[in-house]
């Protein structure tokens, strides 16, 4: 076998693995909605929501409770990533990458700012002030921001076929959640803060992906993502939760009450799914590029519907079936792209 | 804090209409299976790339 054939074979293997990781990301992200939904009804979070709503109103209570749940989610994600790095034997690499702040870890700490308090909090704000379907649709637009930023910042190539696939998946996602959005928008007065939250989610995850793509040029995705969550834990537990406690919300008393077996079990499984989803997302970027990784990752909408249907018994509407079909068509448009087009991910 | 009766009722209500028997346990098992497959694939990936 000559060198060119070996190179082509290696490239094919790299691309198929890249798509596999992006698909793993979508499956884990979709199944995360099971623990991510049920944790809201468990103590202490349901009591916290009721007590804060009684004094500060529903909207404020939702954001403050979401902040505590997200902080715990970041903590359990960190535990899941420790397991991941332990199994892969990457603790040494983790230490080395952490020490190299200027060329390396600064990108992941920057990514944590855009991914954590901007994207995740924005998503919860959109959920609380407008509704879940609107938040999901807003987040589906993040590959547009990610791929455009990656193109202009470090010249990542996006072929016409990949762009078509991403657009079809986004249209599929919008169709899936479209019915819900119409209902939510028809309910009347919509506060601008919900739209701001939607914009924060799309921009935050899109910018995070582009920044991560830059950091991943010189570091491993497994350790890079762990540092990104180290940054997010610092932001939640050292900055946001103490600030909320100082302004008078009972953050610490409710945080201590979360150490209850069922609540911890649900939080740990939320951490495993969210952590593994994120690490698979990061692993796909160096192999197939930020745009394609985020595009396939967007199939989470379809997987969320499937898992919610199977486990919660919520029957999907026809719009969901049409949207799901569009998502599958968009994915195949990208999967079937000529591998020669993906041999180099960056422009000349 | 121990789970209240209302919290447990709300929790169980989520799984009550599931199409899968013992859904309240199977979601955990499914996540564990997926996690083991992902870890196995990651180990294989590390050794081959």
Image (cartoon, rainbow, N blue to C red):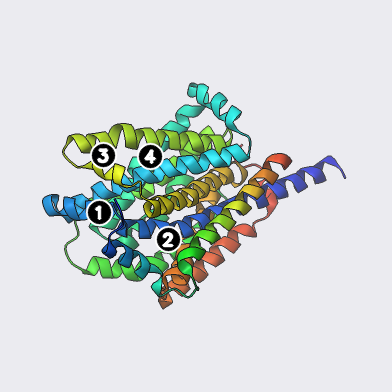
Establish whether labels 4 and 2 are both on one chain.
Answer: yes
Mark 4 lies on residue: A114
Measure how far apart labels 1 and 3 are at the Cα level: 27 Å
Mark 1 lies on residue: A194
Q: Nearer the viewer, residue A20 or A333?
A: A20
Q: Is residue A91 left or right of residue A102?
A: right
What percent of the width, then of the height, locates residue B42? 64, 45
- Kindly report which numbered mark, 2 or 3, lies closer to the viewer in this rendering: 3
Please report the residue visible at 30 percent of the width from the left and 43 percent of the height from the top: A255
Label 1 crowd (10 A; few <14 / some 14-19 / many >=20): many
User: Can the viewer see residue A100?
Assistant: no
Q: Which image quarter holds the C terminus of chain A?
A: top right
Mark 3 lies on residue: A252
- Kindly report which numbered mark, 4 or 2, lies closer to the viewer in this rendering: 2
Measure how far apart labels 4 and 3 are at the Cα level: 25 Å
Establish whether labels 1 and 3 are both on one chain.
Answer: yes
The chain letter for the residue carrying disc 2 is: A
What percent of the width, then of the height, locates residue A104? 52, 27
């Amino acid at each position: 076998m000559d060198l060119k054939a070996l190179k082509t074979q290696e490239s094919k293997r790299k691309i198929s693995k890249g798509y596999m990781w992006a698909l793993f990301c979508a499956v884990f992200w979709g199944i995360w909605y099971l623990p991510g939904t049920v944790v809201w009804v468990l103590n202490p979070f349901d009591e916290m929501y009721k007590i804060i709503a009684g004094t500060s109103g529903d909207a404020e209570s939702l954001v403050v409770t979401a902040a505590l749940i997200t902080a715990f989610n970041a903590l359990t994600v960190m535990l899941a990533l420790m397991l991941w790095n332990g199994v892969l034997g990457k603790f040494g690499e983790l230490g080395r990458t952490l020490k190299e702040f200027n060329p390396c870890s600064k990108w992941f700490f920057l990514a944590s700012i855009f991914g954590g308090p901007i994207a995740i909090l924005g998503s919860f704000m959109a959920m609380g002030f407008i509704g879940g379907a609107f938040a999901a649709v807003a987040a589906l637009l993040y590959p547009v921001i990610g791929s455009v930023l990656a193109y202009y910042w470090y010249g990542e190539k996006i072929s016409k076929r990949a762009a078509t696939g991403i657009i079809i998946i986004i249209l599929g996602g919008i169709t899936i959640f479209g019915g819900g959005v119409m209902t939510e928008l028809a309910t009347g007065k919509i506060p601008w803060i919900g739209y701001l939250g939607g914009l924060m989610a799309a921009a935050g995850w899109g910018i995070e992906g582009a920044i991560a793509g830059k950091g991943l040029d010189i570091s491993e995705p497994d350790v890079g993502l762990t540092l990104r969550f180290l940054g997010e834990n610092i932001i939640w537990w050292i900055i946001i939760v103490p600030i909320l406690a100082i302004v008078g919300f009972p953050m610490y008393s409710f945080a201590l009450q979360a150490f209850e077996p069922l609540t911890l079990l649900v939080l740990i499984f939320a951490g495993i799914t969210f952590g593994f989803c994120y690490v698979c997302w990061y692993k796909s970027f160096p192999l197939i590029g930020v745009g394609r990784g985020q595009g396939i990752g967007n199939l989470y909408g379809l997987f969320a519907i499937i898992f919610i249907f199977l486990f919660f018994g919520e029957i999907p509407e026809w719009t969901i079936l049409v949207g799901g079909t569009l998502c599958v068509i968009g994915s195949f448009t990208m999967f079937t792209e000529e591998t020669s087009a993906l041999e180099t991910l960056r422009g000349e | 804090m121990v789970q209240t009766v209302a919290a447990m009722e709300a929790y169980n209500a989520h799984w009550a209409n599931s199409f899968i028997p013992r859904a309240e346990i199977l979601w955990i098992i499914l996540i564990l299976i997926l996690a083991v497959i992902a870890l196995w694939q990651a180990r294989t990936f590390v050794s081959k790339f």
